[in-house]
Amino acid sequence: MRLFTLAATALAFWSAGTATAQTPWAPTERITYIVGVAPGGTVDLYARGIKNTLEQLKLTHNQVIVVENRVGAGGALALQQLKSNAGNAHDLGTFHTGAIAGAVTGLIKADPRDFTPVAMMVEETSLVAVRADSSLKSGADLVAALKADPSQIRIAVAPALGQNTHMAIAKPLKVAGVAIDKLTIAPFRSSGESVTALIGGHVDVVSATAPVILPQVVAGKLRVLASAAAEPGTGALAGIKTWREQGVAADYISYNGVMLPPGVNAEQIRYWEEALRRVSQDKNWQIMVEQSGNKPIFRGYVESHRYLMSEWQSATTLATSLGLKGVR
């Protein structure tokens, strides 16, 4: 039934075409960008980057955007706030693979399928890193140590168990033969906090996206063991070996973008899709994403809907194979 509803929504969007109102919708009041994690991680980084670019390109119809970090329940509080404003296209939220994975496992008590994904803006690369003085030198070293004792190494993820940074390390470790149900996993509110905990010696390994790890690699504080990308990286990721290059046939790619509350109409979707398309074409935005170690992309409303449903099925299969509880 949900698949039918989403398909009907997408059809209605495209059918709107020339039949839309003669005066297109545009923001008429303050815009709130609701972010479900604490400042410091990539979700917050890109939300603020999108906000700044929308304003710099004057794409908000003279309205200001206020970023509100609504932290708690693995991102569910942010989704609940967004849902409470159904039909109000003055509220933006983050569309992220992690929310799909968290909802599938029951760790986020909200369903991303209830919302309106407008655009995917960033293809993210997840990395596994240790302190620069760690005895672990590669992904193979990590696998060997965890096979010997799965619980001996403390692994930090964010913002909750069962979300994308957890999946990004659990998947290759499972493929490599590690008993992932016995791992010691420590969740933090954001990847910024998990990386700080690693540097401080409170955990031994972190799984996080590239933007929060690479600056600490450059500073000489961290070393990357493996990338969950499907292919070898370029630019800031050049020279970092993927799991596949280290003999583990697994990868995990996540996406970051923008969604709206339920109940918005085709004109509202169209307005934000076009605005975000222009953000994706901005050179400064592209440079910021690339320098962070990720890839700027643009996939609009229809493609985002298709990805949401496809990823829901993929995440369900992965979570089941990983033995995570609460799979819907």
Image (cartoon, rainbow, N blue to C red):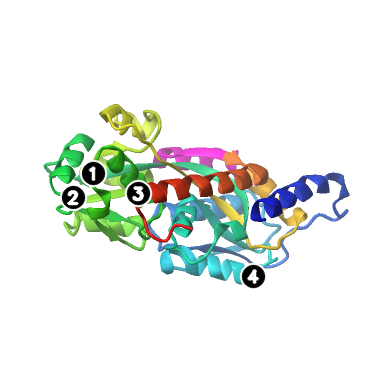
Image depth: mark 2 or mark 4 in front: 2
Whether label 1 touches label 2, CB < 8 Å: yes
> Sequence order check: which comes first, mark 1 or mark 2?
2
Identify which residue is drawn at 59% across, 40% down. 298
Q: Nearer the viewer, residue 59 or 88?
A: 88
Identify which residue is drawn at 32% across, 30% down. 244
Q: Which residues are magenta?
A: 278-297
Q: At label 1, which amino acid type do we have?
A: Val
Q: Nearer the viewer, residue 40 or 326?
A: 326
Residue 258 image offset from top left, x and y in percent: 57, 53
Q: Main secondary structure of the magenta part?
A: helix
Kindly identify which residue carries mark 1: 178
Q: At label 2, which amino acid type do we have?
A: Pro
Residues under labels 2 and 4: Cα distance? 44 Å
Q: Residues within 10 Å of mark 4 (few under 14, many from 20)?
A: some
Disc number for residue 85: 4
Residue 316 image offset from top left, x and y in percent: 47, 50
Residue 171 image offset from top left, x and y in percent: 34, 43
Disc number for residue 322: 3
Identify which residue is drawn at 45% across, 46% down. 317
Q: At label 4, which amino acid type do we have?
A: Asn
Residues under labels 3 and 1: Cα distance? 11 Å
Q: Residues within 10 Å of mark 1 (few under 14, many from 20)?
A: many
Disc number for residue 150: 2
Q: Is residue 287 magenta?
A: yes
Residue 282 visible in image: no
Q: Quadrant of residue 185?
A: bottom left
**Helix, strand or loop status at disc 1:** loop
> Sequence order check: which comes first, mark 2 or mark 4?
4
Residues under labels 2 and 3: Cα distance? 14 Å
Identify which residue is drawn at 49% across, 69% down. 77
